[in-house]
Amino acid sequence: MAKDKTTYTEKTNAELAIILAEKREALRALRFTAAGSRPKDTSEPKKMRKEIARIMTEFSARTNATK
């Protein structure tokens, strides 16, 4: 079964900023652990980067909508 995707349109800017910081930190930690050993899920960094891009896209859409 497919997981439900998180919709970032319902979140506030402050919540998005917190989520973005957490995702970036998780990606950084994953990179360091992957460098030391073999990762179990090799597609995890790609998934995290896409989530970060989704959040940043929502930020951009909100910024452009106010112009």
Image (spheres, rainbow, N blue to C red):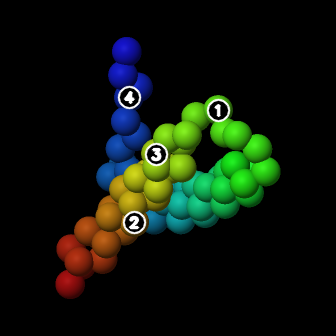
**Element on which disc 1 rests:** loop
Label annotation for residue 47: 3
Q: Which residue is mark 4?
A: 4
Sequence-first tag of 3 and 4: 4
46 relative to 2, above or below: below
**Separation of residues labelled 1 and 3 (CA atoms):** 14 Å
Secondary structure of the residue carrying numbered label 3: helix
Give the structural element (helix, strand or loop) at label 4: loop
- Judged left or right of residue 24, residue 35 is right
Q: Residues within 10 Å of mark 2 (few under 14, many from 20)?
A: some
Tell me whether circle 2 and circle 4 mark residues in contact (CB < 8 Å): no
**CB-based contact (under 8 Å), mark 1 and mark 2:** no
Q: Residue furthest bottom?
A: 67
Residue type marked 4: Asp
Observer-nearest of 20 and 50: 50
Which quadrant of the rendered structure holds the N terminus?
Answer: top left
Q: Earlier in the sequence, mark 1 or mark 3?
A: 1
Q: What amino acid is found at the position of numbered circle 2 in the picture?
A: Met
**Quick one: quadrant of the C terminus?**
bottom left
Which is more N-terminal, label 2 or label 1?
A: 1
In the image, 51 versus 13, the foreground residue is 51
Residue 29, x across and y down, in percent: 72, 55
Q: Residues within 10 Å of mark 4 (few under 14, many from 20)?
A: few
User: Badge 1 is on which residue?
Assistant: 40
Between disc 1 and disc 3, the foreground one is 1
| Residue 56, numbered label | 2
Residue at image point 66% right, 39% down: 39
For the residues carrying marks 3 and 4, which lies nearer the camera in this image? 3
The residues tagged by marks 4 and 1 sit, at their Cα atoms, a distance apart of 22 Å
16 or 31, which is in the foreground? 31
Front-lying residue, 10 or 39: 39
Residue type pointed to by label 3:
Lys
